[in-house]
Image: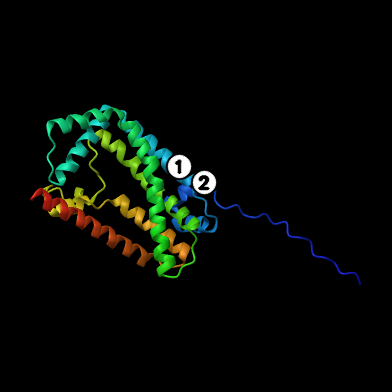
């Protein structure tokens, strides 16, 4: 009897989530989205979205007089926060540089965002692969980190319009807004001011992505990263307080 050969499968191979679906999914369904990212690591599209949106928003904000003055005030407060008083000549030099701020701000975004993503991915590889014995590839880890940057982009889109309306770049999403009664130069105020809700969201999102990739629970990863974040905030607050003599 002749043997009947089974027909070859013609089922379509899934191409995974589209770029827009992944961008939205990071915010609305992170676990499912990072599962797709880990299975099909594609980072270029997400990284370009983060860079282009962040750079365009920064350029638009710093092209306004309000944006330039807000940036100048922020830079002055930064130096004063570490106990350094600017001379009139230094202030004038900083003020003159505001004319090119839209370009330097946008270029800074294009350079710093990929660089920071590379550093974070390298640290994650070192911790999860070298120390914890994981098997994630750098391509997978970098894709997860790149997609988590969507949260930072959302923070930019949320914060810059508020900065324009308030004429200041001081964050409205840090914990300092919940303790307005504190002296802004005190250690507690500086500590709370260094903890931003969007950054906490980003840490949790990245923790979900790394947990999915390395098949580990999100809770311990997020807790560890948040403790490191808090330790950095404490250190910055302590240094600023010590240098300012407050």
Q: Place residue 11 in its image quadrant.
A: bottom right
Which sits in the foreground, 11 or 85? Answer: 85
Residue 206 in the image: state x and y as whole percent.
39, 57
Residue 180 in the image: state x and y as whole percent.
15, 48
Residue that carries the numbered disc 1 in the rendered image: 49
> For this view, does 167 lie left or right of residue 103?
left
Residue 123 appears in the picture as rendered: yes
Query: Element at badge 2?
Result: helix
Please rate how many residues cluster around mark 1, counting C-alpha atoms within 10 Å: few if below 14, some from 14 to 19, many from 20: some
Q: Residue at x 50, y 60 (%)?
A: 137
Q: Residue at x 76, y 60 (%)?
A: 8
Residue that carries the numbered disc 2 in the rendered image: 19
Q: Furthest residue to the bottom?
A: 1
The number of numbered badges drawn on the structure is 2
Residue 81 in the image: state x and y as whole percent.
15, 45
**Image vertical order of residue 1 relative to residue 34, above or below:** below
Please rate how many residues cluster around mark 2, counting C-alpha atoms within 10 Å: few if below 14, some from 14 to 19, many from 20: some
Circles 2, 1 touching at the beta carbon (< 8 Å): yes
Q: How is the image coloured?
A: rainbow
């Amino acid at each position: 009897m002749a043997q009947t050969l089974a027909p070859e499968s013609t089922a379509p191979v899934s191409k995974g989530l589209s770029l827009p679906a992944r961008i939205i999914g990071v915010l609305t369904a992170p676990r499912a989205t990072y599962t797709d990212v880990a299975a099909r690591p594609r980072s270029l599209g997400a990284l370009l979205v983060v860079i282009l949106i962040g750079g365009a928003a920064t350029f638009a904000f710093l092209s306004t007089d309000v944006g330039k003055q807000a940036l100048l005030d922020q830079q002055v407060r930064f130096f004063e926060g570490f106990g350094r008083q600017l001379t009139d000549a230094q202030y004038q030099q900083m003020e003159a540089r505001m004319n090119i701020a839209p370009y330097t701000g946008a270029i800074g975004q294009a350079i710093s965002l990929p660089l920071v993503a590379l550093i974070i991915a390298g640290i994650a590889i070192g911790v999860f692969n070298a120390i914890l014995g994981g098997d994630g590839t750098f391509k997978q880890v970098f894709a997860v980190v790149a997609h988590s940057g969507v949260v930072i982009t959302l923070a930019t889109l949320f914060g810059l319009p508020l900065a324009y309306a308030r004429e200041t770049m001081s964050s409205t999403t840090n914990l300092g807004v919940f303790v307005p009664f504190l002296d802004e130069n005190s250690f507690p105020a500086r500590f709370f001011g260094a903890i931003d809700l969007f950054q906490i969201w980003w840490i949790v999102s990245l923790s979900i992505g790394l947990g999915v990739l390395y098949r580990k629970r999100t809770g311990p990863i997020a807790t560890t990263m948040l403790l490191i974040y808090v330790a950095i905030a404490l250190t910055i607050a302590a240094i600023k307080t010590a240098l300012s003599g407050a």
